């Protein structure tokens, strides 16, 4: 089974780039399931019903999110109603939506889990504890388990991956918008990359217009961020998963312009 995971989609440009490249990429790589992180798809206002719909129309099967999931209050009902739209599972139970889903792919059921880190981020339930609770809920016959770990610290991402090695099929990091070059299969068979990267403007600071990011960091004064313009990229990671064991057999980093 080939599972494609796309890094954070940023704004209008990111949604357009996704729609431009994803259908052909899915055909080329014989993709069975596509997971897209869309938490910045409404620019820097989080994710909206409109931007979520654009991502689904582009070819995403499941959308994951992160710390900006709830910035747009219009999307709260979407989290409740759409089982294919996930938010981090370690948010309080009072938050809209769900952080895990089990999806019927016909010949195979796949579990997708969305988690958020706590190092340099919000104080949520520890992801190690949340992961254990969620994995205990996965039916024994579901072998393929994919985790989007939305976290700031590379150490936290890698530590969770080793903690879950052999129990998750693949773990891909999101949030930092910079694709890492450490794609690998861990010793017990879990596919991993620290960060899948970003789908959005190339000449930017994590998707932000460079002059605005420079002003914010240089002057320390409030700045309203806007997405950069110009040529875009699509970043992601492709995991090949053995269906009988649920273990990863190949990893390929994706970077398209």
Image (cartoon, rainbow, N blue to C red):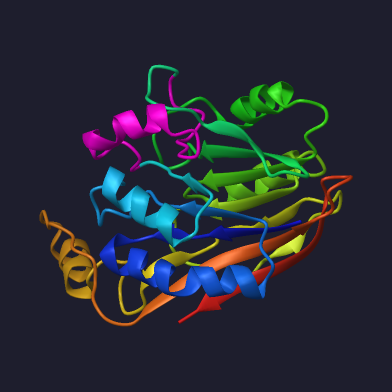
Residue 229 vertical position relative to residue 175 in the rendered view, above or below: below
Q: Position of residue 253 (x, y in %)?
A: 63, 71
Place residue 215 in its image quadrant. bottom left
Q: Is residue 2 left or right of residue 49?
A: right
Q: Nearer the viewer, residue 112 or 118?
A: 112
Q: Is residue 28 left or right of residue 19?
A: right
Q: Which residue sits furthest top?
A: 94
Place residue 121 in its image quadrant. top left
Residue 48 in view: no
Residue 102 in view: yes
Q: Nearer the viewer, residue 24 or 145?
A: 24
Q: Which residues are magenta?
A: 68-92
Quarter that holds the C terminus:
bottom left
Residue drawn at (15%, 57%) of the image:
220
Residue drawn at (65%, 26%) of the image:
134
Residue drawn at (55%, 74%) of the image:
24
- Please check the rendered image and state whether residue 79 is part of the magenta-colored stretch, yes or no: yes
Q: Kindly report the secondary structure that dominates the magenta region of the rendered protein.
A: loop
């Amino acid at each position: 089974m080939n599972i494609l995971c796309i890094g954070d989609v940023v704004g209008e440009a990111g949604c357009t780039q996704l729609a431009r490249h994803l259908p052909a990429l899915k055909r080329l790589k014989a993709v069975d399931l596509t997971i897209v992180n869309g938490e910045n798809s409404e620019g820097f206002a989080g994710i909206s019903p409109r931007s979520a719909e654009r991502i689904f129309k582009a070819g995403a099967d499941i959308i994951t999110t992160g710390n900006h999931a709830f910035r747009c209050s219009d999307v709260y009902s979407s989290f409740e109603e759409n089982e294919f739209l996930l938010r981090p599972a370690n948010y309080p139970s009072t938050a809209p939506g769900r952080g895990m889903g089990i999806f019927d792919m016909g010949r195979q059921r796949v579990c997708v889990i969305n988690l958020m880190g706590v190092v340099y981020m919000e104080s949520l339930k520890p992801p190690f504890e949340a992961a254990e609770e969620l994995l205990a809920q996965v039916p024994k016959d579901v072998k393929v388990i994919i985790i989007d770990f939305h976290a700031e610290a590379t150490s936290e991402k890698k530590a969770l991956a080793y903690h879950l090695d052999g129990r998750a099929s693949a773990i891909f990091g999101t949030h930092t918008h910079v694709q890492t070059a450490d794609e690998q299969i861990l010793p017990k068979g879990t596919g991993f990359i620290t960060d899948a990267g970003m789908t959005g403007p190339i000449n930017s600071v994590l998707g932000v217009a460079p002059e605005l990011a420079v002003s914010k960091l240089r002057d320390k004064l409030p700045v309203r961020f806007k997405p950069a313009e110009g040529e875009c990229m699509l970043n992601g990671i492709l995991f090949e998963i053995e269906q009988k064991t649920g273990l990863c057999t190949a990893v390929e980093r994706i970077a398209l312009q």
